[in-house]
Amino acid sequence: MDTFLQQIPKAELHIHIEGSLEPETMFALAKRNGIELAYKSVQEVRDAYNFQNLQSFLDLYYAGMSVLQTQQDFYDLTWAYLQKAAAENVRHTEIFFDPQAHTSRGIEFATVHTGIHQALQDAKEKLGISAYLILCFLRHLSAESAMATLEQALPYKDTIVAVGLDSSEMGNPPSKFQRVFDRAREAGFYTVAHAGEEGPPEYIWEAIKLLNVSRIDHGVRCVEDTQLVKYLIEQQIPLTVCPLSNIKLCVFDALEKHNIKQLLHMGLCVTVNSDDPAYFGGYVAENLQQTQQALGLSQQDIYQMMKNSFQATFLNPEEKQARIAELDHFMAISVG
């Protein structure tokens, strides 16, 4: 089963590139840029990865970003993730980035974007991975700040497929950003949003009805609203679920109590993703392996989630079909 999970073709739709900053890379970039870290060793950083909730994680997450200064830093960060993704047979990935977390530190938007984008281009040529970029607004900041960031992104809209919403969920409902998302859709961006991780099912409804999202990031609290579950099934709105993240941030007490198998068997379009893998203990294959062991997922369950992930991408219909055909071929060889 572990070999099957490692080798099955995958799409990853919920990965924060800043969340792939491994402690070793953090220290290397700090040294390169002459930055003093609050931690004395890689192990001390890892020991700090003991989160009580989303906010306790975010505090460390934003502190770690301080080492990202130059275009080369953003390139190296992204390239390291893409190499790991290739090793786990991720065939397509749609990557979140948080420009406000960098522009607020005096880093130019172009510096951030160009470094990440160049790595995505190189990955297609050298690793055979297709990749799209999604700009996320930090919801704990103002809607005005988000709108200003959107304006900064417009010159790069040919290389950014969608806008999203992340950071502190509680007290920052999707409705806060309705005007920003209206403007983004007018400019030709797809939309996604984090909702229903710590926030209530009402936040999922708002993301759907007010932001017109194509996908819900997380969404695991949808089960608290039977009408919402029914709607998600009928519309097949994808949920980009991140099991190890949910455990690390205490959304569930244990992986054995996670509801992803329940959601899958109810007919929701659930996918498996890594979220912030450097902080949460695993990339997409590790998420699959640990979730499969905890919940007893079958090969057919895994296949359906992988098919869901390709169908949920922003690839065009022909590209989606080609990826699903590749998945079907793998299944025929592995299971048949």
Image (cartoon, grey):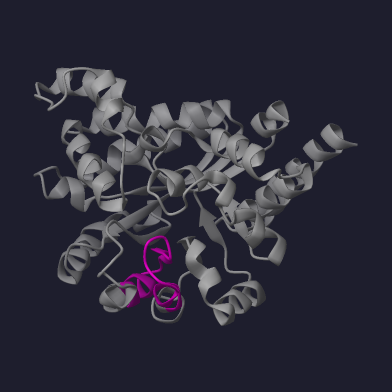
In the image, is 163 to the left or to the right of 220?
left
The answer to whether residue 193 is magenta is yes
Q: Position of residue 57 (x, y in %)?
A: 28, 44
Quadrant in the picture for residue 174: bottom left
Q: At 63% from the left edge and 69% from the top edge, which residue is drawn?
A: 236
Q: At 41% from the left edge and 73% from the top edge, which residue is drawn?
A: 207
Q: Quick one: quadrant of the N terminus? A: top right
Quadrant in the picture for residue 294: top right
Residue 225 in the image: above or below residue 45 = below
Q: Position of residue 12 (x, y in %)?
A: 53, 45
Q: State the residue in front, 88 or 190.
A: 88
Quadrant in the picture for residue 5: top right
Question: Which stretch is magenta?
Answer: 181-205
Residue 184 in the image: above or below residue 9 = below
Residue 60 in the image: above or below residue 136 = above
Q: Position of residue 240 (x, y in %)?
A: 52, 55
Q: At 21% from the left edge and 58% from the top edge, which residue is drawn?
A: 152
Q: State the residue in front, 100 or 248.
A: 248
Q: At 22% from the left edge and 17% from the top edge, which residue is drawn?
A: 41
The answer to whether residue 283 is magenta is no
Q: How many marks?
A: 0
Q: Quick one: quadrant of the C terminus? A: top right
Q: Position of residue 159 (x, y in %)?
A: 39, 51
Q: State the residue in front, 151 or 201.
A: 201
